[in-house]
Image: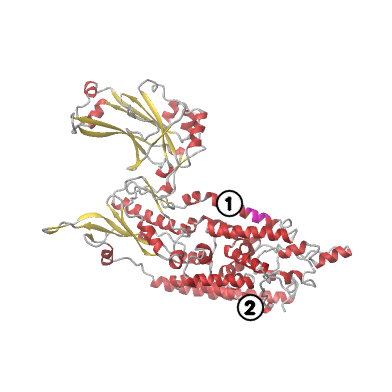
Amino acid sequence: MVNAWPNSRDGAFAESRVQKAWRCGWQWGRQLALLVVAFLCLGAQAVTLSKAQLAQYFPEPLVVGEKDPELPVWPLFRQMRSDKGWGDPVPVGFAFESLDFAPIPGFSGTPVNLLIALDDKGAFLDVKVLSQREPVFVEGLGPVPLDKFVDQYQGLSITQNIKIGSNLNQGGKGGSANVYVDGVAKATASVRIVNQSLLSAALKVARAKLGFAAGKDPDMVGHIKPNVFEPMDTPALWQRGLIGHRVFLNKEVEAAFKGTVGERQDDVALREPESVFSALLAMHLNVPSVGRNVLSEKGWKYLMSWIEPGDHAFLVATRGRYSLVSPDYTPGAVPDRLTLTQSGLPIELRDFVLDDVPRLPADWQGHDVKWRIFKVISQASLDPAEPLDFALSVTREKGQMFPEKARKDLVLKMQLPAEFVDVPASDNKTWHSLWRERAVEIGVLIAALALLTALLVRPKWITASPKRLTQIRTLYLLFTLGFIGWYAQGQLSIVNLTAGIQALLAGRSLGFFLYDPMTVVLWAYVAVSLLAWGRGTFCGWLCPFGAMQDLVGGLARLVKLPQWRLHTRTDARLKKLKYGVLVVVLAMPFISASWTDKAVEVEPFKTAITLVFDRSWPFVAWALALLLLSAFLYKGFCRYLCPLGAGLAVLGRFRLWNWLPRRAECGQPCQTCRHRCEYQAIKPQGAIEYTECFQCLDCVVIYESEELCAPRMLEKRKGRVIPVRSLALSKLER
């Protein structure tokens, strides 16, 4: 038997053997990995559709043209049949693969590849899934929900603000600027990555081939700097470029209608060509240096309290004989003469009623001055860093019974100075909006992690009695299963590691993880807790499937089902199995993506947590079998088979200290904690095996109890002090 104490020669010998084994294993593993990577790099070739394959997706009357020599897109044409045969082909759009333009990795580390067809106006003719390795759509829900999800894009346009929201699809195919597509339950992060890939690829093609300077990514707009404020009067606002202004003379308006039915239909314009037809003024009230200087303090606070994050408010005024609204305009409605566009895209203005008179320039105080405040909602994705076009629409008529009409727009262009706006670093799709949408869930998770940290840093209160520990631990495990697992879908998995390996092998970024904020927050916390306490923080408190096993085991003991406790030697041998499972699973990404998908199914997490047992029977049977096992053999999967637990156990060897208190009598002669440890993580000599400890704190309860701890009972009886064993980290206890 190897001595567990750090001063032992046998212990030093055991330590050197362990180090040698790790060194040899690392060297062989590194060589194997390099060979496999080299083999994959030599044999890897990009797979793209041929013209003949594309033609199968676009049957007559559509025709696929020759591939563009500069960009990986295929032009699409339409041929119309007549009595004389086929007519000349008419261009209708382009077809392309998303992988060529936006290879955003999914949760397998491999991007979803979509076939996208855009018409010449930026509308989606069709979207099809060509390939995908998303775990939830491979063996979980199956591919059908993903196919139905992308089918929703047909008829929508990149000029619309497309968002994902369950049961919020409002049609959107009639030209609305905002539209929602239904997501897929239990696959929220995956469909968001698909949406990001689809829109990013489509926008790049639209800019390159359709002449779009438009199509700003809604998640990459600039933002007003909220803390930049300078007290300024109206002349100073003019000088700093914070007031947009343009004067339209009668002769300019008349010139605009030249050659139309509206020419020479305005007698005043013909009689007084140098007079003012209308002057248009606009100010961006979200800018503190504008809003706080133009409105009263009360009016500014009221405005800011009523607009939502991402909304914008504008003060627009006209002076002259043509107002920004018609005489029969109803307050609260969409303005009938004023429009707003950005990069060629229409943005809806909504009238905002504010009982506050703004401070307009001195020469804007007459009876012919009309002003209103308009709001732009966040879904319009207005970018304050880009130019805006306010247009005053003028309509002229000719004729009495059935008059002909002509309409012209008088445009005011304005742009905020750069010092008042934060400009995005790039126009690639990002994860920021998703984190904002899940801010409440993230806040709840962070609060729960803070509570857990407090309990582990100061465990005396929770371990003061067995009853208190059981109650608090049970409540926390229910939270882990219900909120972190089923509701927030925050189950960490070996899939996270295999996906990372696959992405790195392909030379892709690991940024796809940021599309799942719960996973990022949990992994960040686990990384810190591994250094502090080892694997047990996650495995014992934060793993939803582990919590499910723990609760099943508790119920089994409550109804007095027989509990199996394996012999120490058998238990130790079985615990080595999980390291073999870990090696096999992590080797799969170097060999085959499909094999990886199968290997990770050793974890029942997707079945029991992500899909809540809504899956084909072999996977459900495996998950239920493991739960049944845990009713008799305490957390058997976690202790003997879990590859993620094995990986965390390896990383946990680098923790900074042994934090669970021990006494010199622990193991010599007292064996109480060892016999009561359900995880069998305490050695006969009394040392805790932290790679197998799940931090249930049962041993700490015994340690603190004068009724359960034999040395404490002896201490109380004889009135002497029992020394506490040093908590310095020994190599053998790693």
Name the residue carrying label 1: 444
Where is residue 685? Give x, y as percent: 75, 73
Q: Is residue 480 magenta?
A: no
Decide whether the magenta segment is chiefly helix, strand or loop. Answer: helix
Left or right, 254 with respect to 456, comes to left
Tell me what residue is drawn at x 68 percent, y 64 percent: 696
Asked if residue 13 can be seen in this view, the reply is yes
557 or 152: which is nearer to us? 557
Q: Residue furthest right?
A: 718
Where is residue 112? Give x, y as percent: 40, 62
Where is residue 634? Give x, y as percent: 64, 70
On screen, residue 552 above or below 155: below
| Front position among marks 2 and 1 | 1
Name the residue carrying label 2: 573
The magenta stretch spans which residues? 450-454
Q: Earlier in the sequence, mark 2 or mark 1?
A: 1
Q: Which mark is residue 176?
A: none
Work out which quarter of the rendered image holds the N terminus and state it. bottom right
Secondary structure at badge 2 equals helix
Amino acid of disc 2:
Arg
191 or 171: which is nearer to us? 171
Amino acid of disc 1:
Val
